[in-house]
Image (cartoon, rainbow, N blue to C red):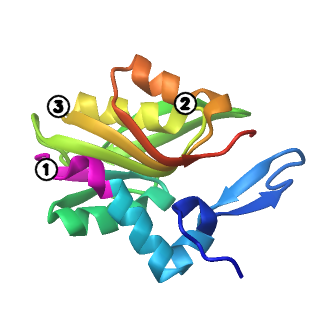
Amino acid sequence: MPKKTSVRDYIRTIVDFPHEGIMFRDVTTLFADPRGFRMAIDQMLHPYAGEPIDKVVGLEARGFILGGAIAHQLSVGFVPIRKKGKLPGTVISQDYKLEYGEAIVEIHDDAIAPGERILVVDDLLATGGTAAAGINLIERLGGEIISCAFIIDLPELGGRKVLTDLGMDVHALCSFEGA
């Protein structure tokens, strides 16, 4: 087996999942390998060395895995943005468009204090819809987003442009062509 030297080497591609014509980029193989997972977390943290961050926000669901590990390394709090109906207590909601419909994400209304500096984390940047909805929620609570960090960018789907058009700084560890 060839030596894995980059985060990309740990990511498995599954053809025709969840639909025909889709090349699914599976990060569970990255998460399962201790060296690969450590490499990903370290590389996701690197651009923010010395940057004051108050909280890490993870987007459902794989963003929870990454966000929790990154928050731990930074010794800051972690905040989940979840699908509608998954958080107890008082929440604020944001709807967004999916490829085949719409969805809603939520955050606790007291999860972020005005002025807190936030790092947004998820595994994959595709169309940018989920991340843009999360950004909207954070900004409604008064959070200042310092950056959005991803393992994978799918440039052909335009998510990076969506986020940069919102004024966001975007980092991704690797990219894959195709959908």
Q: In which quarter of the image is the N terminus?
A: bottom right
> Upstream in the sequence, badge 2 or badge 1?
1
- Expressed as whole percent of the image width and height from the top left, the position of residue 48 reads 23, 48
- The residue pinned by badge 3 equals 142
- The residue pinned by badge 2 equals 159
Residue 46 lies left or right of residue 24; in this view the side is left
- Expressed as whole percent of the image width and height from the top left, the position of residue 105 reads 46, 42
- Expressed as whole percent of the image width and height from the top left, the position of residue 85 reads 46, 52
Q: Label 2 is placed on what type of residue?
A: Gly
Residue 45 lies left or right of residue 37; in this view the side is left
Residue 56 lies left or right of residue 142; in this view the side is right
Q: Which is closer to the viewer, label 1 or label 3?
A: 1
Q: Quadrant of the C terminus?
A: top right
Q: Nearer the viewer, residue 159 or 104?
A: 159
Q: The magenta stretch spans which residues?
A: 45-56
Identify the disc placed on residue 65.
none
